Image (tube, rainbow, N blue to C red):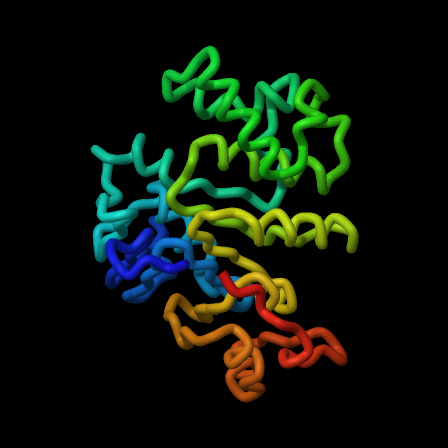
């Protein structure tokens, strides 16, 4: 359930331009309560990834602010912020580089100073959450793409984050892997921001959706209501799959 107290994530008047002067974000305001699952939607080039990279300080801005569970994102807080905000990138091979699955999942907590039984507990807890405990001793490159994505999620969960950011989690998955991942994400008790072009996936997993275009949030509504607004969808180059109707799928409520 969503906590009405301190927000897991609060972005206020965030603006950002790249060094070449290209302005990408224009005064973004966004709040996620504890336990919310929110889809971040928008066409290519809308600013979704740029926004996400501000959440754990990969990018920083001179304008506006980002806070995670009340902690501001700035240079002095980056180590703790990067523990609290876990980003799962679109390509799991960007996150998996150790000889075994266990070592990949242990890498982050070990760098926090954990060892012994405490480290083992973190690893087993994270692998169990994504259904990959039986693969702990396997090399990641021997796994299927869907399995590698689940291990990538586990590497982030092992840090016990406040906010989980998923970049296109359903991309390149076969139908069975897509379903398995949806079931895993649905069980997680963590505030989640899901960047996706997969609108049915957004509808199924996220009760709320935020639409960003040209660096501005243009809509923030219940997901089904937003996807059913054909005028809004068309104006921002979003299209549902042929024959799919938003009312045809029930959102998994927290």
In the displayed orientation, state which residue is furthest to the bottom. Answer: 231
118, 147: nearer the viewer: 118
> Is residue 192 visible from the viewing direction of this image?
yes
Q: Residue at 30% x, 65% y: name it.
A: 29
Residue 93 screen position, x and y as percent: 63, 34
In the displayed orientation, state which residue is furthest to the top. Answer: 116
Q: Residue at 64% x, 24% y: name it.
A: 101
Q: Residue at 72% x, 77% y: name it.
A: 244
Against 7, residue 230 (above or below) is: below
Residue 27 screen position, x and y as percent: 28, 66
Q: Is residue 60 left or right of residue 150?
A: left
> Is residue 23 visible from the viewing direction of this image?
no
Res 134 quadrant in image: top right
36, 235: nearer the viewer: 36
Against 28, residue 244 (above or below) is: below
Res 153 quadrant in image: top right
**Count of numbered marks:** 0
Q: Is residue 149 left or right of residue 158?
A: right
Residue 12 screen position, x and y as percent: 25, 61
Which part of the image, by quadrant, shows the N terminus?
Answer: bottom left
Q: Residue at 58% x, 76% y: name it.
A: 237
Against 60, residue 215 (above or below) is: below
Against 51, residue 138 (above or below) is: above
Residue 4 screen position, x and y as percent: 28, 61
């Amino acid at each position: 359930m969503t906590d009405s107290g301190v927000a897991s994530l609060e972005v206020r008047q965030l603006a950002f331009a790249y060094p070449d002067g290209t302005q990408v974000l224009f005064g973004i305001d966004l709040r996620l309560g504890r336990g919310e699952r929110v889809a971040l939607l928008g066409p290519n080039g809308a600013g979704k990834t740029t926004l996400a990279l501000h959440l754990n300080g990969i990018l920083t801005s001179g304008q506006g602010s980002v806070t995670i569970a009340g902690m501001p994102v700035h240079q002095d807080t980056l180590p703790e912020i990067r523990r609290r905000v876990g980003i799962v990138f679109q390509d799991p091979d960007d996150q998996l580089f150790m000889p075994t699955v266990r070592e990949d999942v242990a890498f982050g907590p070990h760098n926090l100073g954990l060892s012994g039984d405490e480290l083992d507990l973190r690893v087993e807890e994270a692998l169990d959450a994504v259904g990959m405990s039986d693969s702990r001793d396997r090399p990641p490159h021997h796994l299927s793409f869907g399995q590698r994505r689940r291990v990538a999620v586990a590497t982030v969960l092992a840090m016990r984050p406040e906010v989980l950011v998923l970049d296109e989690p359903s991309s390149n998955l076969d139908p069975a892997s897509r379903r398995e991942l949806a079931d895993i994400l649905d069980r997680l008790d963590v505030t989640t921001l899901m960047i996706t072009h997969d609108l049915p996936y957004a509808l199924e997993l996220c009760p709320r959706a935020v639409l960003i275009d040209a660096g501005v949030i243009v809509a923030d509504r219940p997901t089904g209501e937003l996807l059913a607004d054909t005028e809004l969808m068309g104006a921002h180059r979003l299209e549902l799959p042929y024959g799919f109707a938003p009312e045809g799928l029930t959102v998994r409520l927290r």
